[in-house]
Image: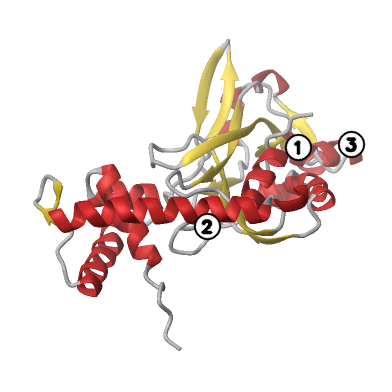
Amino acid sequence: MARRFDHLNDVEAFIAAVERGSLTAAATALGTTPSVVSRALARLEQRLGAQLLRRTTRSLGLTDAGRLYLEQSRTAFGLLAEAERAIQGQGGEVTGSVRLSVPTTYGHYRLPAKLRTFVRRHPRVQVELSISNRNVDLVAEGFDLAIRLGALPDSGLVARKLEDAPMCLVASKAYLKEAGTPRSLADLERHACLSFVMPSTGRVSPWILREDGRDVDWTPQTALRVADDVLGVVSLAEQGMGLCQTYDFIAADRLRRGTLVEVLPKSRGRSRPFSVIYVPHRSLSAASRALIAVLTDTA
């Protein structure tokens, strides 16, 4: 039996294009590319046998058929969302599933405690967790939520800040005994500073520091660079390979055990934000809303 509604993703692309006013803006909101949105619209129009949009290089305009289809589609999606919320809310017990993408730093150090709380509160929710430093395409890859690091671009996605994570500079006792302890930011120039190449840009991530009450972004210049997994610089620092910058929540246990030592503590004071993001035009399931509530709970 053929599936009757295997084109709902194309309908979502159509609604996003109308609401956002362009294929580019729709693609940004959906976490995909303009060419993917364009193909989705073409498939939908072919399926319906009618032109829905008049497209120019500068704007999108609805045809009469498109105006009717938009109205009916919004109504249908609204009914589906209401049905989902009603079923998932029965008996006060949340059910369903959530697909969540998180970076390695958050996935290994911050998420486990939050996820333990969530699973205990909502044992009937199935969680599919992807721990990777790759920025997933929420719509194309079917993710409900993603946790992202840093200041987010104006992507059209909804972002809820989880925390501002303080940073510190660390090194092993063995490295400092051999190379000496830096006393100022200028001293960093003569040290092995372990750098991380950001997957999104291919550039070395700058160290964010403070000096004389002002913010300083300092980019390490070294022969040894780590890509893909930022936790690699911490492992190398523990083995005496040099200095690195990492989050307090990653360094804390290593500082207690003495495998790492903080350096230039007067230069700390800056942080990077972590946020949970999702596509705005989609109605969040009860399971997704419940997970967001746990993730953003600061108690």
Q: Which residue is mark 1?
A: 249
Q: Amino acid at mark 1?
A: Phe
Which residue is located at x 54 percent, y 50 percent?
82
- The residue shown at (81%, 43%) is 174
Question: Would you identify the image quadrant in which residue 189 lies?
Answer: top right
> In this orientation, does residue 231 appear?
no
Badge 3: residue crowd in 10 Å (few <14, some 14–19, many ≥20) = few
Amino acid type at image mark 2: Arg
**Residue at screen point 49% across, 34% down:** 151
Residue denoted by label 3: 256
Mark pair 1, 2: CA separation: 21 Å
Helix, strand, or loop for circle 1?
helix
Kind of residue at disc 3: Arg
Left or right of residue 292, residue 254 in this image? right
Looking at the image, is mark 2 or mark 3 earlier in the sequence?
2
**Nearer the camera: disc 2 or disc 3:** 2
Q: Toward the viewer: 201 or 18? A: 18
